[in-house]
Structures are given as structure tokens and as C-alpha cells.
Image (cartoon, grey):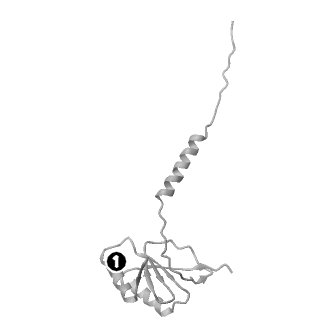
Amino acid sequence: MHFDRRLKPTARVDLIPMIDVVFQLVVFFMITSTFIQAPGISIQLPEARTAEPVVMTKLIVTISSTQEIYLNDQRYTLEGLHKALSLLRSEGSDAVKVVVIEADRTVTYELMVEVLDALRLNGFKGVNLRMREDRG
């Protein structure tokens, strides 16, 4: 007797291990990602039609309408800002050379120039101005 038994190839794709791996990757990136948050200072950013996304850096200068100047979350006067920036420069912090400036729309041009001057005198060359995109 001769039996003709042909084995049918069974191909089966199990998606559960792949879903588990993808889920683990998502959780890993969510936990290890850090988000730089701007200090909670109430300002109204000016609008511009040519506004582009700005990469947030470790150094954010915020100028409010009452001529208060914040370096990240610390409040300074203009003279104090000079001292804080020179201290950063003397620490040899070469990693932070790009600065983001957030200024209220009511800040005077003179104050903006003084802050920019303080940054340039202390060796900060890359300065980005943050603004809102004009949707009109």
C-alpha cells in the first residue's frame, strides 16, 4: 500500500510579538524623551507671516512688557543679565551657543537691542527670535 500524503505548507504570521516589541519601543522613547519647557511667564508673542519653527535650546531669554528679563526661569535686571551671561561664558559652556529670545509685543526696540548686545558681548552668536505664526 502506498499512501500519498502531501503535507500542506502552513505559513502563519503571528503579529503579537511584533506588537509587543513596537509597544516596548514606544514606551522606551516616551520615558527617555525630555521636553524643554519655557518658563511660565505671560507674554504675547508678535505675529509674522514668515515665522518658522524654532528649535528650543537650553537657554531661553524672555522679556516681558514690564521690562522684566528672565534667563530660563530666573528673573534678572539688564545688569544682572550681563553678569549671568558672563558667568555662563566663564564656565566654558560651549554647548550652549544658541539662544532663543521670547519678547512681548510691547517690548521697546531699545530694550531688545540692549539684550541682543548683552548676548553678543558674551559670545552668543546664534540668536533666534520666537514669534507666533500669522494665520491671516
In the rendered view, tell whether residue 12 sits above or below residue 107. above
Residues 118 and 6: in front is 118
Residues 81 and 53: in front is 81
x, y percent for residue 76: 40, 84
Instruction: Point out the image quarter for the N terminus.
Output: top right
In the rendered view, tell whether residue 32 sits above or below residue 101. above
**Residue drawn where x is 51% and y is 88% of the image:** 65
Residues 50 and 26: in front is 26
**Residue drawn where x is 51% and y is 57% of the image:** 30
Q: Quadrant of the rendered structure where residue 74 is?
A: bottom left
**Residue drawn where x is 57% and y is 75% of the image:** 52
**Furthest-left residue in this view:** 90
Q: Is residue 91 left or right of residue 5?
A: left
In the rendered view, tell whether residue 25 sits above or below residue 95. above
Q: Is residue 59 left or right of residue 132?
A: left
| Residue occupied by mark 1 | 88
Answer few, some or many: residues within 10 Å of disc 1's Cα (few below 14, many 20 plus, some between 14 and 19): some
x, y percent for residue 10: 65, 29
Q: Disc 1 residue type?
A: Leu
x, y percent for residue 130: 53, 79
x, y percent for residue 135: 67, 78
SS at mark 1 in the image: helix
Total labels drawn = 1
**Residue drawn where x is 40% and y is 79% of the image:** 124
Instruction: Point out the image quarter for the C terminus.
Output: bottom right
In the rendered view, tell whether residue 26 sits above or below residue 67. above
Q: Quadrant of the rendered structure where residue 59 is?
A: bottom left
